[in-house]
Image: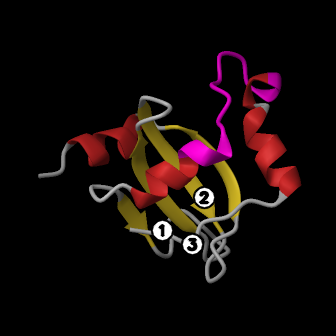
Amino acid sequence: MLDDLWWRDEDAEYIRRRSDRYLGATNIEPEWTLEAAADPRGIVHDPDPKSRTGAVRIIGFSSSAGFVITVIATGGTHAGVTAWKSSGADLRDYEGQG
C-alpha cells in the first residue's frame, strides 16, 4: 500500500486531540495510521476525489486501534494532514471489498 506516510509534530498532535474539537470523536495515534496505510486490503485514492489540493485518501485497518482509519495526506510527499475513525462511505467501501 502506502509505506512512506509520515507526520509533522503539530499534525500528529492535531489527530491525537480530535475529541477536543469534535464531541464523541476518537483520538488517533499516528502509529495507527501507519498500520492503516500499510494494510494490504487498504484503499488509496490518489488523488482523493473530494480534495481540491490533490491530497491522497487512505482507508485501512489498524490492528493496534482495532478499527478502520481514514487518513488524508499530501500528494507527493505523503505527509499526514488529518485522520479519523472511518465511517459512512469510507467504511462501506473498505468492508465491501473482496
Disc 1 to disc 3, how far (Cα)?
21 Å
Within 10 Å of disc 3 (Cα), the crowding (few <14, some 14-19, many 20+) is few
**Percent from the top left, x then y, of residue 98?**
11, 52
Q: Which residues are magenta?
A: 20-32
Inspect the magenta stretch and tell me whether residue 41 lies in it: no
Look at the numbered disc 1 and give the secondary structure of its residue. loop
Look at the numbered disc 2 and give the secondary structure of its residue. strand
Q: Which mark is residue 4?
A: 3
Chief secondary structure of the magenta portion: loop
Q: Which mark is residue 73?
A: none
**Percent from the top left, x then y, of residue 37?**
47, 58
Inspect the magenta stretch and tell me whether residue 21 lies in it: yes
Q: Quadrant of residue 18?
A: top right
User: Disc 2 marks which amino acid?
Assistant: Ile
The residue to which callout 1 is attached is 49
User: Disc 3 marks which amino acid?
Assistant: Asp
The residue to which callout 2 is attached is 72
First in sequence: mark 2 or mark 3? 3
- The extreme right residue here reads 10
